[in-house]
Amino acid sequence: MVPRGTPPDVVAALNREINRVLAEPDMRSWMLTQGMVAVGGTPDDFKRQIDADYQARGEIIRAVGLTGE
């Protein structure tokens, strides 16, 4: 996540690096030991996942007042 208004070229550069790191075997292995699965993808993929998580857990999110900003 980055602040609203972050330049698209900065978002693209961060996305490339994050995907590169998530593809590294050591990172994937470490994440599995923590109970996580490295997925990666595009910024739009990430937004869709956040939206799906919000739909699934929205009541709890609203109750504690979390926002995406």
Image (cartoon, helix red, strand yellow):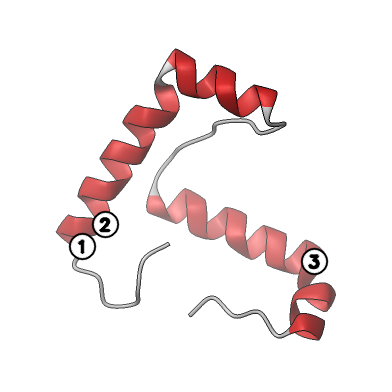
Give the distance between the C-alpha atoms of the residues marked 1 and 2, in whole angstroms: 5 Å
Q: Residues within 10 Å of mark 3 (few under 14, many from 20)?
A: few
Using residue 51 as the reference point, say whether residue 5 is left or right of it. Answer: left
Give the distance between the C-alpha atoms of the residues marked 2 and 3, in whole angstroms: 26 Å
At label 2, which amino acid type do we have?
Val
Q: Could you tell me residue 22's position as x and y percent?
A: 44, 29
Which picture quadrant has residue 58?
A: bottom right
Kindly check if marks 1 and 3 are in contact, taking CB atoms under 8 A apart as contact.
no
Which residue is labeled 1 in the image?
8
Residue at far top of view: 25
| 62 versus 55 height, above or below | below
Q: How crowded is mark 1: few (under 14 residues within 10 Å), some or many (20 or more)?
A: few
Using residue 20 as the reference point, say whether residue 33 is left or right of it. Answer: right
Q: Residue 11 carries which label?
A: 2
Q: Identify which residue is drawn at 56% across, 57% down.
A: 48
Which residue is labeled 3 in the image?
57
